[in-house]
C-alpha cells in the first residue's frame, strides 16, 4: 500500500515489506513480527467526535413585576389591583409636578423635590386642614416627593392611631405612595393621593 511504512516488532526499527530479517536485531520478519508504523484504526479505538457547537446563551427572563406599595411579586404583569394590599400596580412609576393629598377639609400640595410633614402642627397647610382632628398627631406622617415626581411616606414618630396606605400600616421605613392610593391617618381621617402631572404655573396662564 502506497505510503505505508513498516517496522520490526522486536526493536521497532524501520524495515521493508520484502525483508526477511531485521538488520538491527536479527528478528525473523513474519506477519506477526512485521508491524505497521501507522496502524489503522480499529473498532476499539474511540471515534473522533467533532467539537460540540457553541450554543447561544439562554435568554434572561425579565423579573416578575412587583407591587410598588407592598413590594410583593404580582401574579401577572397585567394585574389591575395588587391582591395583597389593594394598590394599583404600575411598571412605570408615574411622574408628577405636584402630589396632592385630598382630605375632606381641603388639599395638601407637595411639589416635586419637596418634603411635607402632615399633622395638626404640620407643614404645607396641613396644620390648618387637620386642626381639631383629635385622632391625628401633631406630626403624623412625612411625605417626600422626589425630583422625578414619585412620592413616598413614613411615620416621623410612632403614632398610637397609626398611618396606613391602602390599609397597610406604615412604620419608620419609607413606603411608596402611588397615584390613586388612600392615605389614612388614624381611623377617621383619610386623603386620596393624586399625582398632578402639570405644574400649577402652566395652568394659570390659560
Image: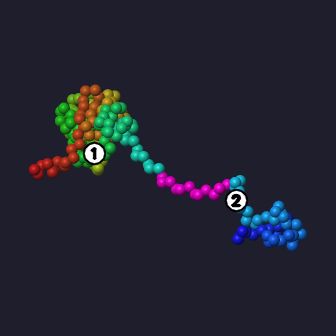
Q: Earlier in the sequence, mark 2 or mark 1?
A: 2
Residue at figure coordinates x 32%, y 30% from the top left: 167
Residue 60, placed above or below residue 78: below
Residue 166: x, y in percent?
A: 30, 32
Q: CA distance from mark 2 to mark 1?
A: 71 Å
Residue 125, placed above or below residue 59: above
Residue at figure coordinates x 75%, y 69% from the top left: 5
Magenta stretch holds residue 50: yes
Magenta-colored span: 46-57
Residue at figure coordinates x 23%, y 35% from the top left: 192
Visible in this render: residue 56? yes
Determine which residue is flagged by label 2: 41
Magenta stretch holds residue 2: no
SS for callout 2: loop
| Between marks 2 and 1 in the image, the one whose residue lies nearer the viewer | 2
Foreground of the two, 142 or 104: 104
- Mark 1 surroundings within 10 Å by alpha-carbon count, few (fewer than 14), some (14 through 19), many (20 or more): some
Determine which residue is flagged by label 1: 94
Left or right: 45 in relation to 202: right
- Mark 2 surroundings within 10 Å by alpha-carbon count, few (fewer than 14), some (14 through 19), many (20 or more): few
Amino acid at each position: 500500500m502506497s505510503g505505508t511504512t513498516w517496522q520490526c516488532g522486536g526493536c521497532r526499527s524501520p524495515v521493508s515489506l520484502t525483508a526477511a530479517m531485521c538488520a538491527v536485531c536479527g528478528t525473523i520478519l513474519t506477519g506477526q513480527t512485521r508491524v505497521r508504523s501507522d496502524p489503522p484504526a480499529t473498532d476499539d479505538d474511540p471515534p473522533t467526535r467533532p467539537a460540540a457547537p457553541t450554543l447561544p446563551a439562554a435568554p434572561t427572563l425579565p423579573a416578575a413585576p412587583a407591587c410598588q406599595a407592598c413590594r410583593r411579586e404580582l401574579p401577572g404583569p397585567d394585574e389591575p389591583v395588587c391582591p395583597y394590599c389593594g394598590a394599583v400596580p404600575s411598571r412605570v412609576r408615574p411622574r408628577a409636578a405636584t402630589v396632592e393629598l385630598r382630605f375632606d377639609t381641603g388639599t395638601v400640595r407637595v411639589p416635586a423635590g419637596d418634603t411635607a410633614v402632615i399633622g395638626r402642627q404640620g407643614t404645607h397647610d396641613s396644620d390648618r386642614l387637620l386642626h381639631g382632628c383629635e385622632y391625628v398627631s401633631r406630626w403624623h406622617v412625612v411625605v417626600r416627593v422626589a425630583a422625578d415626581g414619585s412620592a413616598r411616606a413614613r411615620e416621623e414618630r410612632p403614632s398610637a392611631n397609626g398611618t396606613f396606605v391602602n390599609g397597610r400600616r406604615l412604620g419608620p421605613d419609607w413606603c411608596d405612595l402611588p397615584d390613586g392610593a388612600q392615605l389614612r391617618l388614624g381611623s377617621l381621617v383619610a386623603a386620596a393621593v393624586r399625582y398632578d402631572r402639570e405644574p400649577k404655573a402652566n395652568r394659570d396662564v390659560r
